[in-house]
């Protein structure tokens, strides 16, 4: 079975400061890894994904995540956050049947 | 390219009633899955449909059922509603083993 742990439920950070949202997973099979973002009263939007290849993946809005197989982690980072990054962030893994397992989410609040 | 659309956006039902939620998948996507997101939680997998057949199910009772139609749209039906069924129900579509594309969800409140 697969499971995802997001270690921080809430992360406050000042604008233009760096941030890291932590994600660890447990799986007995090879999985794909994802980060989704959710704004209030909306569905989830894909932020970035790791399927294979380079362990460092980037999004178009400055986020990046690194797949670390030995530590079973997929932490999300951004060197300088903006007010508009305030949202709920979910880490997820998918199994070979494309069933997704989500963490409980990290609420990122960017403080002006 | 049309994204995933869900209807209705909000719904209020009484305990014991039945509800049907609808989803139109993103153009070109042949797989639809449904997730339940309780307040303050991550989405939980309900089931997945591929080519009109259920091909995966999470830990939800049989009163949660679904359909997928030839045009890949889908319905989620919940019978005998309980208070704990109050949640945001998310539909997602995909093509093969890849990222899910989510709709904005249906907020169901059971009173």
Image (cartoon, rainbow, N blue to C red):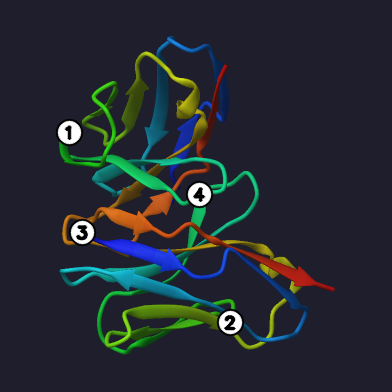
Q: Which mark is residue B52?
A: 1
Asked which secondary structure carries label 2, the reply is loop
Of badges 3 and 2, nearer the viewer stands: 3
Q: Nearer the viewer, residue A51 or A108?
A: A108
Q: Position of residue B14 (x, y in %)?
A: 52, 11
Residue A101: quarter of image: bottom left
Q: Are marks 3 and 1 on the same chain?
A: no
- How far apart are labels 4 and 1 at the CA level? 29 Å
Q: Which mark is residue A1?
A: 3
User: Is label 4 in contact with label 3 (beta carbons under 8 Å)?
Assistant: no
Specify the quadrant that holds the N terminus of chain A: bottom left
- How far apart are labels 4 and 3 at the CA level? 19 Å
Q: Position of residue A71 (x, y in %)?
A: 32, 85
User: Is label 4 in contact with label 1 (beta carbons under 8 Å)?
Assistant: no
Asked which secondary structure carries label 3, the reply is loop
Residue B77: quarter of image: top left
- How far apart are labels 3 and 1 at the CA level? 26 Å
Q: Are marks 4 and 3 on the same chain?
A: no
- How far apart are labels 2 and 1 at the CA level? 39 Å
Judge whether B106 appears above or below B79 on screen.
below
User: Is label 2 in contact with label 1 (beta carbons under 8 Å)?
Assistant: no
Q: Are marks 3 and 2 on the same chain?
A: yes
Question: Which residue carries the number 2 mark?
Answer: A62
Q: Position of residue A20 (x, y in %)?
A: 57, 81
Specify the quadrant that holds the C terminus of chain A: bottom right
Question: Which residue carries the number 4 mark?
Answer: B41
Residue in the picture at 23% in, 68% down: A27
User: Is label 3 in contact with label 2 (beta carbons under 8 Å)?
Assistant: no
User: Disc 3 sits on a residue from what chain?
Assistant: A
- How far apart are labels 2 and 4 at the CA level? 26 Å
């Amino acid at each position: 079975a697969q499971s995802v742990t997001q270690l921080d439920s809430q992360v406050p950070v000042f604008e233009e400061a760096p941030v890291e949202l932590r994600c660890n997973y447990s799986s007995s099979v090879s999985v794909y890894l994802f980060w989704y973002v959710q704004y209030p009263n909306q569905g989830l939007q894909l932020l970035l994904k790791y399927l294979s290849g380079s362990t460092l993946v980037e999004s178009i809005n400055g986020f990046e995540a690194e797949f670390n197989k030995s530590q079973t982690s997929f932490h999300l980072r951004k060197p300088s956050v903006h007010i508009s990054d305030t949202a709920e962030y979910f880490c997820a893994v998918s199994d070979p049947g494309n069933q997704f397992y989500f963490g409980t989410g990290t609420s990122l609040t960017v403080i002006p | 390219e049309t994204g995933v659309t869900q209807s209705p956006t909000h719904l209020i039902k009484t305990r014991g009633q039945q509800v049907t939620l609808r989803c139109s998948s993103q153009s070109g996507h042949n797989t639809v899955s449904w997730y339940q997101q309780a307040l303050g939680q991550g989405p939980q997998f309900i089931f997945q449909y591929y080519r009109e057949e259920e091909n995966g199910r999470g830990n939800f009772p049989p009163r949660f059922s679904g359909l997928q139609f030839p045009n890949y749209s889908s319905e989620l039906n919940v019978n005998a509603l309980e208070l704990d069924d109050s949640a945001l129900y998310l539909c997602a579509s995909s093509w093969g083993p890849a990222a899910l594309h989510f709709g904005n969800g249906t907020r169901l409140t059971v009173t």
